[in-house]
């Protein structure tokens, strides 16, 4: 492109001149050479001062150059300035023949009018004819004095030089045609590039408009952290963090962890993690401080080149402050209501216990009804306890080296009475000892929930079994039943709080839909996972995977 501009520079300069200056500039090289000859003649060839033909050639050249400057070519039509190179042949012929035999080489000056005519854009036939016969006009007079004694060499010399000039004219013509074709190609490419540039800018504007119209912040960075693309929402997030860094993710930023007080180190910030090649989702951070602090959920995906190389990342920021505050308010409400329920329930249960301690003095029917009240009050207190546990953002977990086999045995023993009432057979296939890194109280609670659910959702009897197996770094527990089961859609939602399947509701199975959500919180608090496999009418299997050993997780 730079070479193209360089080549077009002189042409642009030439077109910027007026017609007189253009004509004079075309004539100037030949005029300078003739002027140099005129100055050198008195010193180098003084005898030529007595040659009227030679002097006439010099004077004609001078007159032609003055004509180039003085004639108003811009007012004349049909390019009459081309008469100047034609008359140059005559002036050169006078110089050459007037200076013979001292300066026979002056005929070579004919190349200047030949170039002018060939590059002028006139008809190719006209320029070729003028180039040949104009040069012939220069050479023929030298034969007049030798006419009786002409040799083949003389004739060859006279014919050869015009042929050479004709060849020069043809070469210039071909070069001009080639140059014009190149210029046309370059002009076409230039138009195409301008069109592509315009389309690229339009696409860029469209992309930026789309990005700015979204309600999430978007930042694309290269592998070094330089911003490639961002939208207004992301820039607002950067302003909220008080960022003073040239590179995103570096320097001072008010980005806090989930406690809203601890500043995240640079390596834990979303963009820094993304540049390091991490791919993540739902990474919650707090941007800013004080009343303007915002909860931001971030996600990142790498930008991968065609060769599989890492070229950067795209980071998405979503303002979830309203959702987080609503969740906190909901948890606070549930916690407060649960706490308020506990006091009267404990009072009711305590007083009923006192009355039933002397049930011999009570009528049988009254004692029976009090036991119904006691049983339902205890059930209501258990539900309140579940609500309190589910409202907690994090359960306290204190893992240690624990034998899960003993926990399974205890859980089955606690559920034996419930299983007998429901005509359920309990079985276990657990190696002993089965060591895991777990909190025995919390894992016991989780096992009780799973076994109790398995019995409850097997209303027609059947079998509830617990199996286990261990790997090098993990331990797997599975609780299976042969009960009513659930659909694939329901099994994907079964760990959500307050979720209950339609079949369980139709069967009037009691529950608040909190047990499995609490169980999941307990398992994830250990750094483990829980999953469900089920089929309608085919029973369910809940699988828990826990670490076999390791440091306690941080909460």
Image (tube, rainbow, N blue to C red):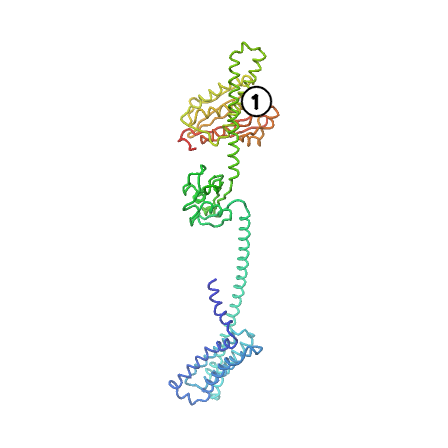
Residue at image location 45% in from the left, 89% down from the top: 52
Tell me if residue 386 comes above or below residue 150 in the rendering: above
User: Could you tell me if residue 379 is visible in this image?
Assistant: yes
Viewer-side residue, 349 vs 395: 349
Tell me if residue 326 comes above or below residue 247 in the rendering: above
Q: Quadrant of residue 459?
A: top right
Residue furthest to the bottom: 50
Question: Residue 211, percent across and down?
Answer: 53, 48
Tell me if residue 366 comes above or below residue 465 in the rendering: above
Residue furthest to the right: 506
User: Could you tell me if residue 150 is visible in this image?
Assistant: no
Viewer-side residue, 235 vs 99: 235
Count of marks placed on residues: 1
Mark 1, Cα crowd under 10 Å, few <14 / some 14-19 / many 20+, is many
Quadrant where the C terminus is found in the figure: top left
> Residue at label 1?
458
Question: Residue 353, percent across and down?
Answer: 51, 16
Viewer-side residue, 370 vs 57: 370
* Label 1: which secondary element: loop
Question: Residue 17, percent across and down?
Answer: 50, 73
- In the image, taking residue 367 as reference, residue 92 lies left or right, namely left
Tell me if residue 495 comes above or below residue 108 in the rendering: above
Question: Residue 127, percent across and down?
Answer: 54, 76
Residue furthest to the left: 43
């Amino acid at each position: 492109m730079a070479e193209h501009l360089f080549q077009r520079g002189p042409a642009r300069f030439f077109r910027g001149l007026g017609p007189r200056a253009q004509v004079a500039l075309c004539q100037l090289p030949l005029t300078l050479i003739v002027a140099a000859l005129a100055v050198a003649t008195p010193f180098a060839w003084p005898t030529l001062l007595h040659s009227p033909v030679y002097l006439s050639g010099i004077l004609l050249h001078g007159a032609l150059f003055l004509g180039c400057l003085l004639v108003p070519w811009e007012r004349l039509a049909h390019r009459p300035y081309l008469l100047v190179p034609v008359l140059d042949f005559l002036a050169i012929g006078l110089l050459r023949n007037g200076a013979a035999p001292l300066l026979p080489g002056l005929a070579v000056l004919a190349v200047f009018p030949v170039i002018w005519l060939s590059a002028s854009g006139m008809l190719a036939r006209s320029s070729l004819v003028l180039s040949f016969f104009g040069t012939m006009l220069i050479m023929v007079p030298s034969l007049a004095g030798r006419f009786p004694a002409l040799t083949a060499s003389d004739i060859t010399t006279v014919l050869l030089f015009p042929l050479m000039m004709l060849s020069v004219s043809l070469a210039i013509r071909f070069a001009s045609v080639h140059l014009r074709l190149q210029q046309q190609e370059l002009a076409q490419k230039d138009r195409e590039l301008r069109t592509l540039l315009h389309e690229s800018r339009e696409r860029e504007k469209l992309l930026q408009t789309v990005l700015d119209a979204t309600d999430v912040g978007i930042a694309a960075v290269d592998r070094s952290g330089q911003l490639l693309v961002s939208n207004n929402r992301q820039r607002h997030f950067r302003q909220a963090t008080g960022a003073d860094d040239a590179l995103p993710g570096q320097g001072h930023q008010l980005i806090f962890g989930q406690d809203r007080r601890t500043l995240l180190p640079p390596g834990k910030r979303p963009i820094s993690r993304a540049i390091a090649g991490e791919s993540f989702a739902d990474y919650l951070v707090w941007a800013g401080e004080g009343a303007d602090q915002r909860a931001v959920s971030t996600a990142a995906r790498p930008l991968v080149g065609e060769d599989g190389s890492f070229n950067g990342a795209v980071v998405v920021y979503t303002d979830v402050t309203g959702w987080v505050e609503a969740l906190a308010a909901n948890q606070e409400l549930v916690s407060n209501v649960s706490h308020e329920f506990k006091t009267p329930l404990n009072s009711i249960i305590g007083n009923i216990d006192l009355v039933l301690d002397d049930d011999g003095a009570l009528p049988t029917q009254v004692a029976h009804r009090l036991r119904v009240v006691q049983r339902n009050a205890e059930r209501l207190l258990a539900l309140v306890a579940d609500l309190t546990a589910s409202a907690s953002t994090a359960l306290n977990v204190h893992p240690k080296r624990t034998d899960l086999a003993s926990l399974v045995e205890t859980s089955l023993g606690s559920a034996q009475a419930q299983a007998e009432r429901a005509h359920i057979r309990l079985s276990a296939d657990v190696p002993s000892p089965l060591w895991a890194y777990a909190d025995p109280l919390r894992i016991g609670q989780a096992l009780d929930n799973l076994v109790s659910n398995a019995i409850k959702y097997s209303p027609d009897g059947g079998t509830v079994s617990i199996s286990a197996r261990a790997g090098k770094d993990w331990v797997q527990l599975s609780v299976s039943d042969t009960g009513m089961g659930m659909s694939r859609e329901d099994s994907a939602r079964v760990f959500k709080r307050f979720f209950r399947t339609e079949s369980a509701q139709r069967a009037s199975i009691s529950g608040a839909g909190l047990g499995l959500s609490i169980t999941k919180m307990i398992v994830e608090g250990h750094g483990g996972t829980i999953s469900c496999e089920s089929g309608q009418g085919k029973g369910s299997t809940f699988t828990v995977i826990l670490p076999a050993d390791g440091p306690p997780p941080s909460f």
